[in-house]
Amino acid sequence: MKNLSGPQKTVAQTVGVVVIMGSLAWASVPFYDWFCRVTGFGGATNVADAGSDVILDREITIRFDASKERDFPWEFKPVVREMTLRIGETGLAFYEAYNPTDKPVAGSASYNVTPYEAGGFFYKIQCFCFEEQILMPGERVQMPVTFYVDPEIVDDRDAKYTKHITLSYTFHQIDLPEEVQAGLKVEQDKTVN
């Protein structure tokens, strides 16, 4: 292998650093998601196929919060701001989204739970998070979230005193799928001709 001169060596090192940093950035999202699911850090929740078999007499209040990234055109809000359930009881809440624009807009929601120590005890049975949502012009939809709080929360050293849990969703705009874009192009071509 040929020895590199000063400028060539600097370029090779710079390219190497860029490749390593790009690889780390690419791997950080799945690694962080895995870390949050394993540790419950950041209010990551769990997923269940069905509700809890155990329902306690102790109640807990679930608060619902909605936000959206800057310049995202939808209106987005929880239908009900809070509900009180018995720990282990299955809850059903709805979030409402509305597209007031004159064009289709696609979005995807991320979530978190606070206080963070309660995240590992919050189980979602059905959720719209991380799913592509497309709203046509003027379309309004209600999106369900089915969940329960694991009764084991009462035995956890850090989470057992939790009386309120806040479930927050944030919508982010994503690119329209190619088939929707193709359909729009066909419609535009029809109106032009």
Image: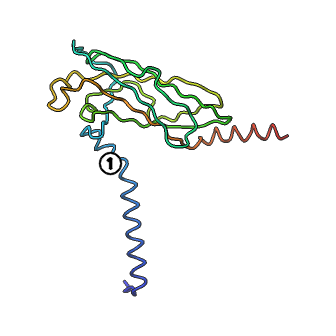
Q: Residues within 10 Å of mark 1 (few under 14, many from 20)?
A: few
**Residue 174, horizontal then vertical, whole percent:** 54, 42
- For the point 40% across and 80% down, the residue is 10
**Residue 90, horizontal then vertical, whole percent:** 33, 17
Toward the right, the furthest residue is 193
- For the point 42% across and 71% down, the residue is 15
Position of the C terminus by quadrant: top right
Q: In this view, does 74 lie to the left or right of 61?
A: right
Query: Image quadrant of residue 60?
Result: top left
Residue sitting nearer the eye, 164 or 131? 164
Instruction: Judge whether 30 appears above or below 159 on screen.
Output: below
- For the point 65% across and 31% down, the residue is 137
**Residue 107, horizontal then vertical, whole percent:** 53, 37
**Residue 32, horizontal then vertical, whole percent:** 32, 47
| Amino acid on which the number 1 mark rests in the picture | Phe
Toward the top, the furthest residue is 57
Residue sitting nearer the eye, 26 or 60? 60
Q: What element carries label 1?
A: helix
Question: Mark 1 sits on what residue?
Answer: 31
Position of the N terminus by quadrant: bottom left
